[in-house]
Image (cartoon, rainbow, N blue to C red):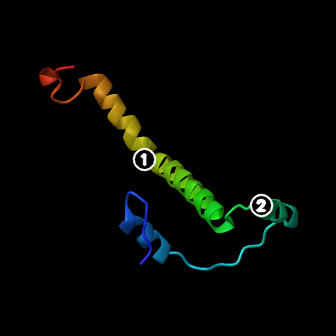
Amino acid sequence: MPVQTSASPRHVRSRQSLKRATNLSLSTDVLNAAKALDLNLSQVCDDYLRQLVRQEQERRWRSEHTDFVATYNATIEAEGLPLEQWRTF
């Protein structure tokens, strides 16, 4: 069994086991440049797509909860923070 140097070997193993092969169409010039730089295309695509998904999820959450956040902020502005009298900072 190979030695893993990661701080969280279970996490690394689980991420690898959850990967699935897929087909992508990429611009030839970008693909050639990436290969010339010895970039791991799978890892680069996975990392970037993960970042885009996270950003879109955050954007949608903010959009879906705009009314609640505005109402909560108005309540705090009008009434103050709950339990503020016991705050030590």
- The quadrant of the picture occupied by the N terminus is bottom left
Q: Residue furthest right?
A: 29
Q: Residue furthest left?
A: 86
Mark 1 vs mark 2: in front: 2
The structure residue drawn at horizontal position 23% and vertical position 27%, both measured from the top left corner, is: 81
Could you tell me the amino acid type at mark 2?
Answer: Ala
Q: Position of residue 4 (x, y in %)?
A: 43, 66
Q: Position of residue 84 (x, y in %)?
A: 18, 24
- Left/right placement of residue 61 relative to residue 45 reads left
- Residue tagged 1: 65
The structure residue drawn at horizontal position 39% and vertical position 39%, both measured from the top left corner, is: 69
Q: Secondary structure at mark 1?
A: loop
- Left/right placement of residue 44 relative to residue 37 reads left
What is the crowding at mark 2: few (fewer than 14 residues within 10 Å), some, or many (at least 20)?
some
Instruction: Please name whichever residue, 85 or 76, is drawn nearer the observer in this view of the structure.
Output: 85
Instruction: Please name whichever residue, 24 or 72, is drawn nearer the observer in this view of the structure.
Output: 24
- Residue tagged 2: 34
How many marks are shown on the rendered structure?
2
- The quadrant of the picture occupied by the C terminus is top left
Which of the 4 image quarters holds residue 45? bottom right
- Left/right placement of residue 59 relative to residue 2 reads right
Check if mark 1's residue and mark 2's residue have beta carbons within 8 Å. no
Relative to 22, residue 47 above or below: above
Instruction: Please name whichever residue, 32 or 4, is drawn nearer the observer in this view of the structure.
Output: 4
The structure residue drawn at horizontal position 46% and vertical position 69%, both measured from the top left corner, is: 15
How far is mark 1 from mark 2, CA to CA?
40 Å
The structure residue drawn at horizontal position 72% and vertical position 73%, both measured from the top left corner, is: 24
Which of the 4 image quarters holds residue 49? bottom right
Q: Position of residue 47 (x, y in %)?
A: 58, 59
N-term mark: 1 or 2: 2
